[in-house]
Amino acid sequence: MSVIAIDIGQRQSGVAISHSGLFVEMHSTINTVPRDQFLITLGKIIQQEGVEQIVVGFPLRPGRSENKVAREIRQIA
């Protein structure tokens, strides 16, 4: 099963892929802005790599409360 891991940042996002479930390799860094282009690029990577599962990094403050970045990531995810 192929898994994609995405660390969404305000300007750029890191993308990593695992085809084996054991090892993860850095795939690319893509621009997060503009958001529509980010989603198109991400969709192409997902299709090209045959991704079956998506993991998105979700930053929380101490006490597990969400910050502005976490709320933005929730909207994208």
Image: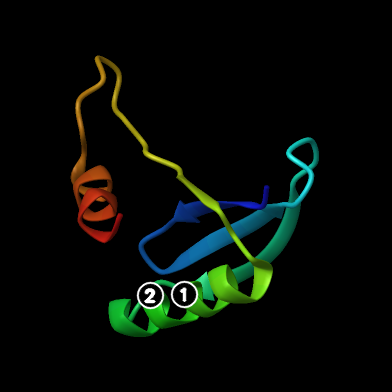
Q: Residue at x 45, y 42 (%)?
A: 57
- Residue situated in front as seen by the camera: 4 or 7: 4
Q: Position of residue 75 (x, y in %)?
A: 20, 56
Q: Residue at x 68, y 47 (%)?
A: 1
- Residue situated in front as seen by the camera: 50 or 7: 50
Tell me if label 2 and label 1 are in contact, CB under 8 Å.
yes
Within-10-Å neighbours for mark 1: few <14, some 14–19, many 20+: few
In the image, taking residue 38 as reference, residue 27 lies left or right, namely right
Q: Position of residue 71 (x, y in %)?
A: 19, 47
Q: Residue at x 27, y 60 (%)?
A: 76
Within-10-Å neighbours for mark 2: few <14, some 14–19, many 20+: some
Q: Position of residue 40 (x, y in %)?
A: 41, 82
In the image, taking residue 67 as reference, residue 13 lies left or right, namely right
Under mark 1, the amino acid is Gly
The residue carrying mark 1 is 43
Under mark 2, the amino acid is Leu
In the picture shown, does residue 6 fall above or below 46? Answer: above
Mark pair 2, 1: CA separation: 6 Å
Residue 39: image tag? 2
Name the residue at the top extreme.
63
Q: What secondary structure is marked by label 2? A: helix
Instruction: Tally the marks.
Output: 2
In the picture shown, does residue 41 fall above or below 74? Answer: below
Residue 77: image tag? none
Q: What secondary structure is marked by label 1? A: helix
- Residue situated in front as seen by the camera: 69 or 17: 17
In the image, taking residue 73 as reference, residue 7 lies left or right, namely right
Which quadrant of the figure has residue 46?
bottom right
